[in-house]
Image (cartoon, rainbow, N blue to C red):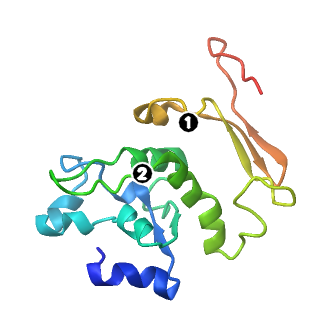
Amino acid sequence: MIDAADVPRFKKLGVLASMQPLHAPLQENDPDIWPTRVQESAWDRAFAWQTLREAGAILAFGSDWPVALPDPILAIAGAINRQPWKPGHNSHNQTLAEAIASYTKDAAYAEFAENEKGQIKVGMVADLVLLSDDIFTIPPENITDVRVSMTFCNGRLVYTRHLDPDENNIKI
Protein backbone atom coordinates (compact mmCIF):
# COMPACT_ATOMS: atom_id res chain seq x y z
CA MET A 1 0.00 0.00 0.00
CA ILE A 2 1.41 3.35 -0.98
CA ASP A 3 0.14 6.65 0.34
CA ALA A 4 -0.60 9.03 -2.54
CA ALA A 5 1.69 11.65 -0.97
CA ASP A 6 4.63 9.24 -1.21
CA VAL A 7 4.26 8.41 -4.91
CA PRO A 8 6.20 11.44 -6.27
CA ARG A 9 8.87 10.93 -3.62
CA PHE A 10 10.06 7.73 -5.32
CA LYS A 11 11.49 9.65 -8.29
CA LYS A 12 12.54 12.69 -6.27
CA LEU A 13 14.56 10.58 -3.81
CA GLY A 14 15.69 7.96 -6.32
CA VAL A 15 13.83 5.21 -4.46
CA LEU A 16 13.47 1.98 -6.37
CA ALA A 17 10.17 0.08 -6.19
CA SER A 18 10.97 -3.62 -5.81
CA MET A 19 7.69 -5.42 -6.42
CA GLN A 20 6.47 -8.93 -7.07
CA PRO A 21 3.64 -9.35 -9.60
CA LEU A 22 2.60 -12.74 -8.23
CA HIS A 23 1.68 -11.10 -4.92
CA ALA A 24 -1.14 -9.15 -6.57
CA PRO A 25 -4.44 -10.94 -7.17
CA LEU A 26 -5.44 -10.64 -10.83
CA GLN A 27 -8.99 -9.52 -10.01
CA GLU A 28 -11.29 -8.99 -7.05
CA ASN A 29 -12.75 -12.50 -7.15
CA ASP A 30 -9.30 -14.14 -7.39
CA PRO A 31 -8.98 -16.98 -4.87
CA ASP A 32 -6.26 -14.96 -3.12
CA ILE A 33 -7.53 -13.53 0.16
CA TRP A 34 -5.59 -10.26 -0.17
CA PRO A 35 -8.58 -8.05 -1.14
CA THR A 36 -10.38 -9.18 2.01
CA ARG A 37 -7.51 -7.93 4.19
CA VAL A 38 -7.64 -4.31 3.04
CA GLN A 39 -10.50 -1.86 3.04
CA GLU A 40 -12.15 -1.63 -0.36
CA SER A 41 -11.46 2.12 -0.41
CA ALA A 42 -7.72 1.35 -0.45
CA TRP A 43 -7.77 -1.23 -3.27
CA ASP A 44 -6.73 1.28 -5.93
CA ARG A 45 -3.47 1.88 -4.04
CA ALA A 46 -2.61 -1.83 -3.78
CA PHE A 47 0.28 -3.01 -5.90
CA ALA A 48 0.20 0.37 -7.66
CA TRP A 49 2.68 -0.49 -10.39
CA GLN A 50 1.33 1.89 -13.02
CA THR A 51 0.88 4.79 -10.61
CA LEU A 52 4.54 4.49 -9.61
CA ARG A 53 5.73 4.05 -13.19
CA GLU A 54 3.78 7.11 -14.37
CA ALA A 55 5.35 9.10 -11.51
CA GLY A 56 8.82 8.22 -12.83
CA ALA A 57 9.75 5.45 -10.40
CA ILE A 58 11.83 2.52 -11.55
CA LEU A 59 10.13 -0.82 -10.93
CA ALA A 60 12.28 -3.89 -10.39
CA PHE A 61 10.22 -7.06 -10.49
CA GLY A 62 11.21 -10.24 -8.68
CA SER A 63 9.65 -13.36 -7.27
CA ASP A 64 10.12 -13.09 -3.49
CA TRP A 65 10.71 -16.85 -3.58
CA PRO A 66 9.86 -18.98 -1.57
CA VAL A 67 6.81 -16.82 -0.78
CA ALA A 68 5.79 -16.81 -4.45
CA LEU A 69 6.81 -19.04 -7.33
CA PRO A 70 10.09 -17.99 -9.00
CA ASP A 71 8.64 -18.39 -12.53
CA PRO A 72 8.94 -15.03 -14.35
CA ILE A 73 6.56 -16.19 -17.11
CA LEU A 74 3.74 -16.58 -14.58
CA ALA A 75 4.61 -13.24 -13.02
CA ILE A 76 4.75 -11.45 -16.37
CA ALA A 77 1.34 -12.95 -17.18
CA GLY A 78 0.04 -11.56 -13.89
CA ALA A 79 1.54 -8.14 -14.56
CA ILE A 80 0.00 -7.82 -18.04
CA ASN A 81 -3.37 -9.46 -17.33
CA ARG A 82 -4.29 -7.82 -14.03
CA GLN A 83 -7.83 -6.41 -13.92
CA PRO A 84 -9.30 -3.62 -11.76
CA TRP A 85 -10.63 -4.99 -8.50
CA LYS A 86 -13.53 -2.56 -8.68
CA PRO A 87 -15.09 -0.60 -11.57
CA GLY A 88 -13.36 2.75 -11.95
CA HIS A 89 -10.13 1.57 -10.36
CA ASN A 90 -6.80 1.38 -12.16
CA SER A 91 -5.83 -2.19 -13.08
CA HIS A 92 -2.16 -1.24 -12.70
CA ASN A 93 -1.45 -3.83 -15.38
CA GLN A 94 1.75 -3.43 -17.32
CA THR A 95 2.55 -3.66 -20.99
CA LEU A 96 4.63 -6.65 -21.95
CA ALA A 97 7.60 -4.39 -22.67
CA GLU A 98 7.27 -2.75 -19.22
CA ALA A 99 7.09 -6.10 -17.45
CA ILE A 100 10.12 -7.45 -19.30
CA ALA A 101 12.11 -4.28 -18.56
CA SER A 102 11.24 -4.59 -14.87
CA TYR A 103 12.55 -8.16 -14.84
CA THR A 104 15.71 -7.43 -16.84
CA LYS A 105 17.32 -4.01 -17.15
CA ASP A 106 15.57 -2.47 -14.15
CA ALA A 107 16.32 -5.51 -11.96
CA ALA A 108 19.98 -5.24 -13.02
CA TYR A 109 19.88 -1.54 -12.08
CA ALA A 110 18.50 -2.50 -8.66
CA GLU A 111 21.61 -4.56 -7.96
CA PHE A 112 24.02 -1.96 -9.40
CA ALA A 113 24.77 -4.30 -12.32
CA GLU A 114 23.21 -2.31 -15.18
CA ASN A 115 26.57 -2.10 -16.96
CA GLU A 116 27.00 -5.90 -16.85
CA LYS A 117 23.60 -7.45 -17.48
CA GLY A 118 19.91 -6.88 -18.04
CA GLN A 119 20.12 -6.05 -21.75
CA ILE A 120 21.21 -7.75 -24.93
CA LYS A 121 24.24 -5.66 -25.83
CA VAL A 122 27.85 -6.24 -26.81
CA GLY A 123 29.92 -6.69 -23.68
CA MET A 124 27.01 -7.65 -21.43
CA VAL A 125 26.68 -11.00 -19.69
CA ALA A 126 24.66 -13.27 -21.97
CA ASP A 127 21.96 -14.52 -19.60
CA LEU A 128 19.21 -15.40 -22.07
CA VAL A 129 16.21 -17.65 -22.57
CA LEU A 130 14.76 -18.94 -25.79
CA LEU A 131 10.99 -19.27 -25.48
CA SER A 132 8.62 -21.63 -27.23
CA ASP A 133 6.56 -18.75 -28.62
CA ASP A 134 6.94 -15.12 -29.62
CA ILE A 135 5.41 -13.51 -26.55
CA PHE A 136 4.86 -10.26 -28.43
CA THR A 137 2.49 -11.91 -30.89
CA ILE A 138 0.42 -14.31 -28.78
CA PRO A 139 -2.69 -13.17 -26.90
CA PRO A 140 -1.72 -11.94 -23.40
CA GLU A 141 -4.03 -14.48 -21.77
CA ASN A 142 -2.02 -17.30 -23.38
CA ILE A 143 1.38 -16.27 -22.06
CA THR A 144 1.23 -18.91 -19.32
CA ASP A 145 1.36 -21.55 -22.08
CA VAL A 146 4.83 -20.37 -23.11
CA ARG A 147 7.70 -22.64 -22.12
CA VAL A 148 11.42 -22.05 -21.79
CA SER A 149 13.14 -24.01 -24.54
CA MET A 150 16.74 -23.09 -23.73
CA THR A 151 18.54 -21.14 -21.05
CA PHE A 152 21.97 -19.55 -21.37
CA CYS A 153 23.90 -18.26 -18.36
CA ASN A 154 26.91 -16.11 -19.09
CA GLY A 155 26.70 -17.27 -22.70
CA ARG A 156 26.78 -20.98 -21.81
CA LEU A 157 23.86 -23.30 -22.57
CA VAL A 158 22.70 -24.63 -19.20
CA TYR A 159 19.23 -25.96 -20.01
CA THR A 160 17.41 -27.47 -22.98
CA ARG A 161 13.81 -28.58 -22.74
CA HIS A 162 13.25 -32.10 -23.94
CA LEU A 163 10.57 -32.05 -26.59
CA ASP A 164 7.76 -34.55 -26.86
CA PRO A 165 7.67 -36.24 -30.29
CA ASP A 166 4.32 -34.51 -30.94
CA GLU A 167 5.73 -31.02 -30.36
CA ASN A 168 7.17 -28.82 -33.06
CA ASN A 169 10.92 -28.62 -33.41
CA ILE A 170 12.58 -25.55 -32.02
CA LYS A 171 13.69 -23.26 -34.82
CA ILE A 172 16.17 -20.49 -34.33
Q: Residue at 19% of width from left, 59% of height from top?
A: 35
Q: Where is residue 132 in the image (x, y as percent from the top left)?
A: 63, 29
| Numbered badge on residue 136 | 1
Which residue type does callout 1 highlight? Phe
Residue 71 in view here: no
Which image quadrant: the C terminus?
top right
Q: Circle 1 — which element? A: loop
Q: How far is the residue under mark 2 from the one under mark 1?
A: 14 Å
User: In this image, 119 relative to 16: left or right?
Assistant: right
Query: What residue sits right under mark 2 in the picture?
Result: 79
User: In this image, 167 relative to 62: left or right?
Assistant: right
User: In this image, 50 relative to 65: left or right?
Assistant: left
Vertical comparison of 19 with 134: above or below: below
Q: Which of marks 2 and 1 is nearer the N terminus?
A: 2
Q: Residue at 61% of width from left, 73% of height from top?
A: 110
Q: Residue at 23% of width from left, 47% of height from top?
A: 31
Q: Residue at 24% of width from left, 51% of height from top?
A: 84
Residue 162 in view here: yes
